[in-house]
Structure formats: structure tokens, C-alpha cells
Image (cartoon, rainbow, N blue to C red):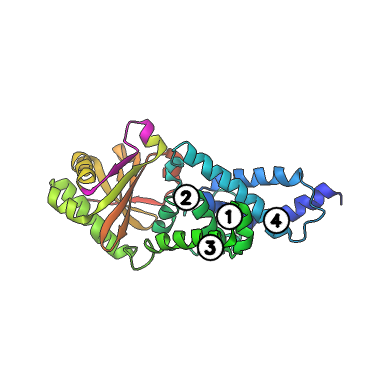
């Protein structure tokens, strides 16, 4: 076996874990596959004769590729397509059927976690994902983010606090979410502005993905009154739906979903609404339109 074949074999052995890392970092199966392709190109051009821990070394390469992609998104002030929401019903790639891959994805606490990951800075997301989800030590993470191990630990701690705010017990219960979202949509249809504002956090944010912005929607609307105005205006065309098992809403002219609204709750009020218009992302969502 020549060196190229040996490297390819080692890379394929690590692929399920590496793809899971990239998936959590980027939130997209397609981009995770692109990151792995770039990582393979870097690997094939590298001298690996002194590498003792191939798995750790490959994880570092993939993490650096993902960090570059996240920083590129930030520099363009561009949300990832379809908010890069979790592809919980995705079938992208053979690795999705791998037991290890499924186990690594199973630690999700729901949509709220993956939405809040998109609000972290690139280095916060990297440190949190690598340490809290994949047990990568801080001294290794520090080399990737070019910070001290203590600074990497602080980044992960800050990210962890924000993630916990969206975790269980903070509004992620599906029954409670459905109760609040159902009441919110009903108030929208009635034109009950006061009821809408009461269900919204004062600092609520309505964020629209890149495709929605291209079609003319604002990228971000902040504040309870401004978000309530939007839903009063468009309530007639929005229908309740289950999205990845959680209460949401959809605009579906002719029964074809064109825009999905995903809600994040904290302490019984809506803190974030994500408006998804990207067709590929809509197709990935497990979406069931409800009556009423």
C-alpha cells in the first residue's frame, strides 16, 4: 500500500466523526461535506510522517477549515442559507446512516440549541462544539483559535451560558411551545396587538435568511412591537405547522411551503423567530402543515 492509499484509508476511518464535527460547526450537511473535501486536500499535501495521533490531527484540520468558513460568513455579514438550521430530517451523505454519526447528533437538546449556535461568534462556536460535544482538550483548541488554553476555556464558558439559556427548562418543552405559538398565531389572525406583544420577549428578534432578504424582507427586525407589526400584517397568509416536531408557522400558497417561521422560547415568551425561505433548507425540514 502506497502513502496515498494509506492516508485515504485513515481518513475514511475517521470520516464519521470528522463529518459530525463539521456538521455541528456549520449546521449544514452539504457544507460539512465541503469542509471534509477541503480537509482531505490539505491532508494530501501534508507531511504526516511525524503525526502520532491521526484522529486528533484530522480533527484540528477540519476545525480550522470550519473556522475559516464561519469567519467568511461573518465578514460578509451573511446568514448561512436557510439560517443553516439543523437538518434533523436530512439524508445528506452516507455518514448520516452511520451509528457513530447518529450518536454524535443525538446529544442535541432541540432546535433551540442549534439556533443559538448560529448566534455565537466563530471562535465561541468552535470552542463549545469541540470541547463540550467532542471532548477535545483546551490545549488543542487553543492552538486552533490561536489563544491561550485559559482564553479558550473562557470562550467555551461564555458560549455554554448562552446555549444553556436555550436548553431544557427554558421554553423548549414541545407542549408549552405549541401552547404559546398557537396563542401567538391566533392573536395575529385576530389582530390583537396587545396579546402579541405580551407573548413576545421585549428584545425579541425576527431574523430572515439570505434568500428571504434577496426577495425583499429585512434581515433583522428587533423588539416586540416591531415583530408584532409584521405578524399583524401577514397573519392572513401564515398557517400553523409542526417543524421538526415543534410548533411553528408556514406560508404555503397552494399548499406548497414557501416560507417557514421557527420560534425559540425562553421562560414562556418568544425570544427569536427565524424566517426561512431557502428552498433547499425548507425541503430538509420535517414540516407538517396543520389546520386552523
Mark closest to the chain's N terminus, 3 or 2: 2
For residue 205, the mark is: none
Please tell me whether residue 17 belongs to the stretch shown in magenta. no
Q: Secondary structure at mark 1?
A: loop
Q: Are marks 3 and 4 in contact (CB under 8 Å)?
A: no
Query: Can the viewer see residue 70?
Result: yes
Which residue carries the number 2 mark? 121
Q: Are marks 1 and 2 in contact (CB under 8 Å)?
A: no
Mark closest to the chain's N terminus, 3 or 4: 4
Mark closest to the chain's N terminus, 3 or 1: 1
Q: Is residue 222 left or right of residue 137?
A: left
Q: Is residue 223 left or right of residue 283?
A: left
Closer to the eye: label 3 or 2: 3
User: How far across and how far down the image is residue 28, in percent?
Assistant: 51, 47
Q: Secondary structure at mark 3?
A: helix
Q: Which residue is found at the position 61% from the left and 64% from the top? A: 137
Among the 4 quarters of the image, the one containing residue 180: bottom left
Disc 4 versus disc 1: distance between alpha carbons?
18 Å
Closer to the eye: label 2 or 4: 2
Which residue carries the number 1 mark? 147
Which residues lie in the magenta part? Answer: 213-224
Q: Secondary structure at mark 2?
A: loop
Q: Secondary structure at mark 4?
A: helix
Disc 3 versus disc 2: distance between alpha carbons?
15 Å
Q: Which residue is found at the position 25% from the left and 43% from the top? A: 238
Q: Residues within 10 Å of mark 3 (few under 14, many from 20)?
A: many
Mark closest to the chain's N terminus, 2 or 4: 4
Which residue carries the number 4 mark? 57
Which residue carries the number 3 mark? 153
Amino acid at each position: 500500500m502506497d502513502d496515498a492509499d494509506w492516508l485515504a484509508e485513515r481518513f475514511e476511518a475517521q470520516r464519521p466523526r470528522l463529518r459530525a464535527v463539521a456538521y455541528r460547526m456549520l449546521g449544514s450537511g452539504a457544507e460539512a461535506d465541503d469542509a471534509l473535501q477541503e480537509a482531505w486536500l490539505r491532508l494530501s499535501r501534508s507531511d504526516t510522517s511525524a503525526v502520532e495521533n491521526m484522529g486528533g490531527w484530522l480533527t484540528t484540520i477540519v476545525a480550522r477549515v470550519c473556522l475559516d468558513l464561519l469567519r467568511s460568513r461573518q465578514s460578509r455579514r451573511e446568514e448561512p442559507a436557510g439560517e443553516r438550521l439543523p437538518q434533523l430530517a436530512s439524508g445528506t451523505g452516507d455518514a448520516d446512516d452511520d451509528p457513530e454519526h447518529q450518536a454524535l447528533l443525538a446529544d442535541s437538546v432541540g432546535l433551540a440549541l442549534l439556533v443559538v449556535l448560529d448566534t455565537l461568534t466563530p471562535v465561541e462556536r468552535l470552542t463549545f462544539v469541540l470541547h463540550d460535544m467532542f471532548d477535545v482538550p483546551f490545549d488543542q483548541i487553543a492552538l486552533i483559535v490561536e489563544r491561550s488554553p485559559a482564553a479558550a476555556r473562557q470562550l467555551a464558558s461564555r458560549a455554554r451560558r448562552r446555549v444553556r439559556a436555550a436548553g431544557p427548562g427554558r421554553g423548549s418543552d414541545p407542549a408549552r411551545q405549541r401552547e404559546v405559538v398557537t396563542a401567538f398565531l391566533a392573536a395575529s389572525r385576530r389582530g390583537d396587538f396587545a396579546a402579541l406583544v405580551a407573548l413576545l420577549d421585549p428584545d425579541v428578534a425576527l431574523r430572515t435568511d439570505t434568500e428571504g432578504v434577496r426577495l425583499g424582507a429585512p434581515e433583522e427586525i428587533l423588539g416586540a412591537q416591531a415583530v408584532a407589526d409584521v405578524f399583524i400584517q401577514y397573519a392572513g397568509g401564515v398557517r400553523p405547522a409542526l417543524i421538526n416536531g415543534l410548533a411553528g408557522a408556514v406560508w404555503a400558497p397552494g399548499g406548497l411551503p414557501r416560507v417557514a417561521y421557527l420560534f425559540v422560547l425562553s421562560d414562556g415568551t418568544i425570544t427569536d423567530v427565524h424566517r426561512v425561505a431557502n428552498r433547499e433548507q425548507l425541503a430538509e425540514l420535517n414540516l407538517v402543515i396543520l389546520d386552523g
